[in-house]
Image (cartoon, grey):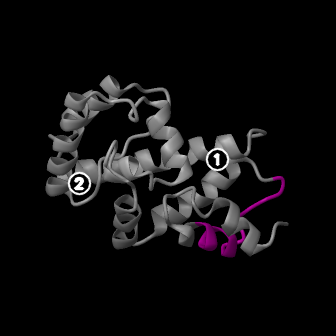
Amino acid sequence: MMSREDFVSRFGGVFEHSPFIAERAYDGGHLREPLTAAGVHASLTAVFRAASPEERFGVLSAHPDLAGRLAIAGELTEDSRKEQSGAGLDRLSPAEHARFTELNSAYVEKFGFPFIIAVKGLGKDDILSAFEIRIGNSRDEEFATATAQVERIALLRLTSMLPEAE
């Protein structure tokens, strides 16, 4: 079995800037060799769901704004950079960038955390459409939607890391 340090080093960023999830998953002893995307995802997701509401809020808050200032400054994690680039968010027109900025600000003001969506397979228009719909949600609805999206992002990341998934 992989050491705790190696496991956390490899999977600690699957949930954005939240290595405590990988630490707790490893410490929980539920991981089985060979590691698969489905198996690791099940363990990490169980820890995420068992975390306190404040900890889950922290995981949501650790995500960058889509096409936001971190992207412009080149300060995204490598995973986030690839995901946003794949959706074309690094190639927005000035008007599109202004709309994303406006929606990001309104969303964070309303919900207290950034808009989160698994962008793989989506284009900028799909993302804007989801943004405009979801900003009308209640805080509880959006917290549930955002946490489900975080779990989906984690699965997509793990699938790229562990292609031999079940």
146 left or right of 109 in image = right
C-alpha span from label 2 to label 1: 27 Å
In front of the other: 144 or 92: 92
The C terminus lies in quadrant: top right
Answer above or below: position of 165 versus 123: below
Q: Are marks 2 and 1 in contact (CB under 8 Å)?
A: no
- Magenta stretch: residue 162 in it? no
Q: Residue at x 60, y 45 (%)?
A: 157
Q: Which residue is mark 2?
A: 140
Q: Is residue 134 above or below residue 121?
A: below
Q: Tell me residue 59's x, y (percent).
A: 41, 63
Q: Earlier in the sequence, mark 2 or mark 1?
A: 2
- The residue mark sitting in front, 2 or 1, is 1
Q: Position of residue 50 (x, y in %)?
A: 47, 67
Q: Which mark is residue 158?
A: 1
Image quadrant holding the N terminus, namely bottom right
Secondary structure beneath label 2: helix
Name the residue type under label 1.
Answer: Leu
Q: Name the image quarter holding residue 143.
A: bottom left
Judge left or right: residue 67 versus residue 40: left
User: Which residue is located at x 74 percent, y 48 percent?
Assistant: 36
Q: Position of residue 111 (x, y in %)?
A: 20, 56
Identify the residue at image location x=59%, y=60%: 44
Q: Nearer the viewer, residue 146 or 13?
A: 13
